[in-house]
Amino acid sequence: MTSLVDAESVLTIDIGSVNTRALLFDVVDGQYHFLAGAVAPFTGGPPFFDISEGVHIALTHLQEVTDRPLLDETNRLMVPSQQDGSGVDRLGITFSAGRDLNTVTVGLLDEVSLESASRLAATSYLKVTDTIGLNDRRRTDEQLDAILKAAPELVILAGGTEKGATRSVSKLVDLVLLACKVLPSEKRPKVVYSGNQALAKRIQEAVGKVTEVIVTPNIRPTFDLEDLNPAMNTLAQIQGSLRAQQIGGLANLAAFSSEAPLPNATAIGRLVRFLSEYYDPSKGVLGVDLGANATVLAAGRAGKLHLNVARPLGMGAGMTSLLQQVPLSEITQWLPVDVPESQVRDYLWQKATFPTSLPMTTTALSIEMAAARAILRLAATQMLERYPFLNMAFEPIFISGATLAQSISPIQSLMAVLDGLQPTGITTLFLDPYGLMAALGSVAPGNAVLPVQILDSGTFVNLASVISPVSDARPGTVILKVKVTSDQGEYKTEVKQGSIVVLPVRHGQQVQVFLSPQHGTHIDPRWRSGAGFKLAGGLCGVVIDARGRPLHLPDDPAKRRDTLIRWTHAVESRRAA
Amino acid sequence: MLAPVIHILGLTNIRRTRLLPVSGKVAVRVGQRVNASDVVATANVPTRHILVDVRRGLGMIRAGEAERAIVRMEGEKLQPGDVIAETGGIFSRVMRAPEAGTIVMISGGRVIMEAESAPLELRAGIPGVVTEIHPDQGATIETNGALIQGVWGNGKVGEGLLFVLLQSPDATISRTDIDISLRGAVVAAGHCSDPDVLRYAAELPLRGLILTSMTADLLPVANSVNYPVIVLEGFGKIPLNDAAMRLISTSEKRDVALTATINPANSERPELIIPLPAESNTPPEMTYFAPEQMVRIQGDPYRGKIGVIVQIRPGTTTLPNGLRTPAADVRLDKETVVIIPLANLEVLM
């Protein structure tokens, strides 16, 4: 672990599909601080087809706001830093731009290795175009055509537990080899082998003659054990190198960094995994990034990462995917105003066509926030389906992405996150207004001090501490008695099923909370009944969300809109008081 | 700040490169004049293969043994029943081609035949002159004329005489507006929310349809019709911007080309091109936001409107709905100046 003795200044650059973001960190008064950030458009597309222009604009802006030279007279980034303090010691690069890599997953059993391969593919920006397993009923030549039609740039080949089957795996390898041979050499996919290691050498020799083979540790070493992390890192490296070929200027930029460009989702995953060890390992950490084209949910518990990238699914081009995956009613149910479904559909298609555009009216903002809720809901559901042993109890939860963390009011963010994610238990919601999560994740493996000190510095904004009790009681029944003590005195209240209540706690104020659940209400499996615990008020104070899990909205549209407005007013009025 | 650019121009030089997704044959030469629907390159994409497992079929243990039995070479074209492999000897056993195809690979005692392939035709997309050949890939075509870029298209290409049904920027087209007199024409119409308009236009058929805007529920029908459909403003009921309205309404009965393809990664937008016999320069594809620029606005309540930037506001501006964002003051007319997020502006060039 890096110590402050050899403290280094760090610049991170994120290449997103809409923006290029440069962030500068350095030590001030013995502590790492986030000094400044600058944003420029993504220029990897037309007319530049090179990210260098966007990077240059962002760095020039960063130089201006920090008054610190980062580029030399030839406009080259100065790495490492110079005697006069100009330049930086280290550069980290993350990316989410670029099209998804067509990927075919191949494995033995649907519920075992193929499921693990599919979970592995979902940890990054891959598009699974076909899946072939041992139980696939298609003839060999049909499977071959399926692979060719899928036009894979990557094949994830899994299967066989350690010391397990080799013959069946060999059959699948044979099929992949055949497909690679039929394809012209420039169209052959890279093959990631993550199966029984007893076959690794043979596969390397046989398939390696026709295409690049990358062997990772077995993702399913035993029938009931899955370990995706080593393969996930390998996959990130492969994507970094492929992206460097696809995105103009990325390879040149990467030459200034000691590490390969990292997919944004992988970087967020690294940070969450790191924090899940740093914080109370029993509680778990959730990182959420609602992007333009992808929605990343990274759940970490005691150093184990469960990463799910829902893509394409986001607030920009990813909106079309939302419209294809959920009925429109699942979006419109979150609208507090009466807007015809046709108008909502038209608005969201227009948004997908102009992904950078912003809502200028209250109705337009309501539609976008309704879509944000539906996206978060869908992404959370996907994550829980992929990792059935997870639940939505995390402490804390970090929220990133321009839609939720940068432009709208704290109450709008809070309600969208609570409605979309529907967390349970006791949690703190932190907003990432500067988009630092991926940057910190890219730095964490080589400099663990930096992310910790940045997180402690208040750069992430405490949105609210939230208690979400779960109860089967009828609406209106008192399910929780609450006592809050602080240096300001004592406050008691009762919380009814179906309500959302904001406790009178100011931003930054520390309070002791005592909960007395009624009628069999569950609070949090990690909470000791009867004991008080400390909470800090966020921008929206301390919130008790007793609306139920899963959250049910009234079927009647008018009642539903009234309910949504009432909930928002409950948070607004108490906060204002 | 870098600004997105949209072209709505009365006269400009238009240069478009068309490339196959796979290697193929280029069907044009430099200097050749082409129409929008002319094929400039072709390729064959294999769609179905047959695997003939000689080793298993002839009951051989070793792959090498099976390979020796194979009497064909890679690249050979076979007819149904042609012998692929034979053991030889008095009681020779043979394996025959189950159907016609070309041998693409012989490996491990197995023969892979390409049984079917789909022809892929790359069309010029714009009428003009071929100025550059990209060997095995495609060509670059150039022309001069008026150019109006849209926001959505159904991927088809076409050309024909332009008939303008658009009487006002906010006009709506209905099924009764289309009749047999429009057969074979490219029709410029207003907003469309009736799928029967698209279906009847296919029956006539029209050679192309230019819509001001369209409801998004028509997308499946618009994608299924066999003529090009382009949408100039977007989804919902959006009036046509003044600049495009002027160009279209003065181009009645001119030959036009419609390229309804969209590929943001390659700078491809759906386009209406009206070739003109005059020379011009290629328009810039990028610019930075600045005062006096003519811009088109995205988003209610001003979507589709054209204005002029008065000033770029310093820092961020809070909008009436609470959003904070970089913005500009945009003059819509003599009396009206509105605040618009920079993210909602496209510069007209």
Image (cartoon, rainbow, N blue to C red):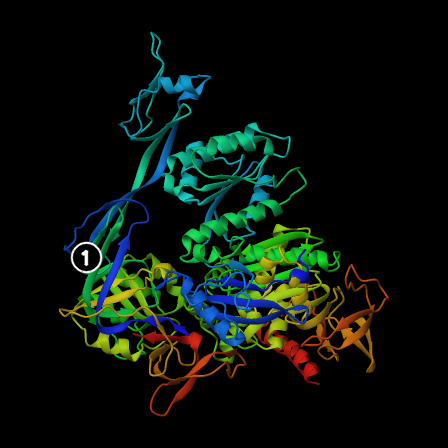
Residue A100 point in image, percent of width and height: 46, 53
What chain letter is assigned to the residue under label 1?
Answer: B
Check the image and name the residue furthest to the right: A530
| Residue B205 visible, this angle | no
B27 w.r.t. A215: above or below: below
Residue B71 in the figure: left or right of residue A273: left
Indicate the quadrant containing the N terminus of chain A: top left, top right, bottom left or bottom right: bottom right
Residue B341 in the figure: left or right of residue B173: right
Q: Nearer the viewer, residue A369 or A37?
A: A37
Residue A559 point in image, percent of width and height: 61, 75
Check the image and name the residue furthest to the front: A83
Residue A198 in the figure: left or right of residue A243: right
Residue A220 point in image, percent of width and height: 63, 40
Residue depicted at x 53% and y 68%: A86
Q: Amino acid at mark 1?
A: Thr
B329 w.r.t. B108: above or below: below
B294 w.r.t. A42: above or below: below
Q: Nearer the viewer, residue A212 or A563?
A: A212
**Mark 1, other Cα within 10 Å: few <14 / some 14–19 / many ≥20:** some
Question: Which quadrant holds residue B98?
Answer: top left
The residue to which callout 1 is attached is B131
Residue depicted at x 36% and y 17%: B69
Q: Nearer the viewer, residue B65 or B271?
A: B65
| Residue B155 visible, this angle | yes
Residue A404 point in image, percent of width and height: 57, 70
